[in-house]
Amino acid sequence: MMVLSVKKIARIAYFLMLYTFAIVGFVFVGMFFAIRLKITDVKGSVDNLSQNFQNQAEENQIIIGSFSNKIATSSGELDNIKTEIDKLTIEKDLKIKNLCSLEELSYIAPKNVDKILTVKKQIKSDLTVAQMIFAIKTYLTDKDSFDKNVSDCMSNFESRKVNEDEIITRVKNSNSQNIFVWPDEDQWKTVSQSITKDKDIINRAALMADIDPRLIVSDLVVEQLRVYYSARELYKQYFEPLKILSNMNKISLGVMAIKEDTAAQIESHLKDRSSPYYLGEKYENILNYNQGQNLATERYNRLMDNNHYYSYLYAGLYLKQMMTQWKNAGFDISSRPEIVGTLFNVGFPQSKPNANPKIGGSTVQIGQNKYSFGRLSYEFFYSGELTEIFPCF
């Protein structure tokens, strides 16, 4: 039997350590260049329900168009009367369709219907109610049967005598599970409490960016749920007991997970009047630095600050810049949180205005359910959660 000398053992150990460090170094260098060369940038995938969302959006646009129709002063009196009758008919049909849908859903998802009815009293918007109903419909296994029952209800509405008060009584204090997976999880309690603590800061940042704060919160919720379900034990040990939002992403910065180069682009677009993302003169100096500051260091400090104000402000401006790009191209996506959320996730390079935008982005897995970033943004927006502090528009 050959016995190795101490010298040989030490030499083998030395080379093993050397090769190990070389491999680790190679991996880290590779990761560095991958990030710098944007190889790791999220390309995202298209959600398999993307066309369903597009169909719903087109249906909404028809309704919005009828609501906003103005009577032409040159039109005759009969034309004016006809226009008003058509408008009232569409409004009435939407109300009836919503009521029939809620009647049907009150047996399928009573907890969600209760949320919808609460929101309905707050905002009195039939279009928002329709969006909330659609969010639930994406979970139904037999949509054709549901649509048929709703259609039958609408056709026989007077004889069916569908009553909102009866629906309210039926779903009140329901012990059923939420049809959405995440609101019944303990993690949602932590995230919602943490967001509630930040409500004043979020609202202040949204006001500065002139954007609906619920759009910011929709993407914040997805980022936080994504962190939790990918690092569950760490979240439970640290973030959950302290009721604070995660700031732990090493590649992206802050609670909104904004990359450093994206933050630099947001700053640049504010001042570049030739940029398709340019917001106007009043926004040009909103992210100015003090003279003599190291931009990279200060940008990092802003986004990692436990106050979170700059995380929300950068996110709000980021969303507004892309929404402005699309609006200037003739496509208003301000009422489409699923598209806004998708763009937030995939970034400036993939923000290409068009008439048939796709929802998607990176995949977020919650339990056995897989969501695209854009779909989960939409789902929160119209879930009825946190509407007491961040109302739906």
Image (tube, rainbow, N blue to C red):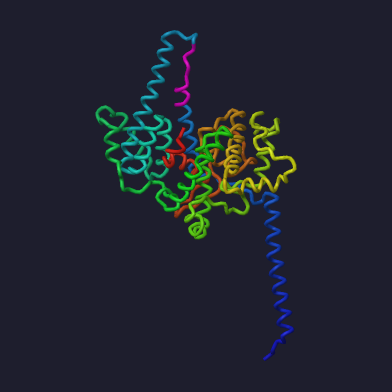
Q: Position of residue 30 (x, y in %)?
A: 69, 58
Residue most extreme to the bottom: 1
Q: Please say if 351 is above or below 246.
A: above
Quadrant location of the N terminus in the rendered image: bottom right
Which residue lies at the image location 25% right of the left edge and 30% below the top edge? Answer: 161
Q: Position of residue 91 (x, y in %)?
A: 39, 24
- Which of the two residues, 382 or 338, is positioned nearer the viewer here? 382
- Which of the two residues, 122 or 17, is positioned nearer the viewer here? 122
Which residue lies at the image location 43% right of the left edge and 35% below the top edge? Answer: 131
Say left or right for 1 vs 94: right
Q: Please say if 295 is above or below 8.
A: above
Q: Position of residue 293 (x, y in %)?
A: 72, 44
Magenta segment, which residues? 63-72
Q: Quadrant of residue 138?
A: top left
Q: Quadrant of residue 299?
A: top right
- Which of the two residues, 11 or 154, is positioned nearer the viewer here? 11
Q: Quadrant of residue 207?
A: top right
Which residue lies at the image location 53% right of the left edge and 32% below the top edge? Answer: 334
Q: Please say if 53 is above or below 298.
A: above
Question: Is 90 within the magenta?
Answer: no
Q: Tell how many labels.
A: 0
Q: Position of residue 314 (x, y in %)?
A: 61, 40
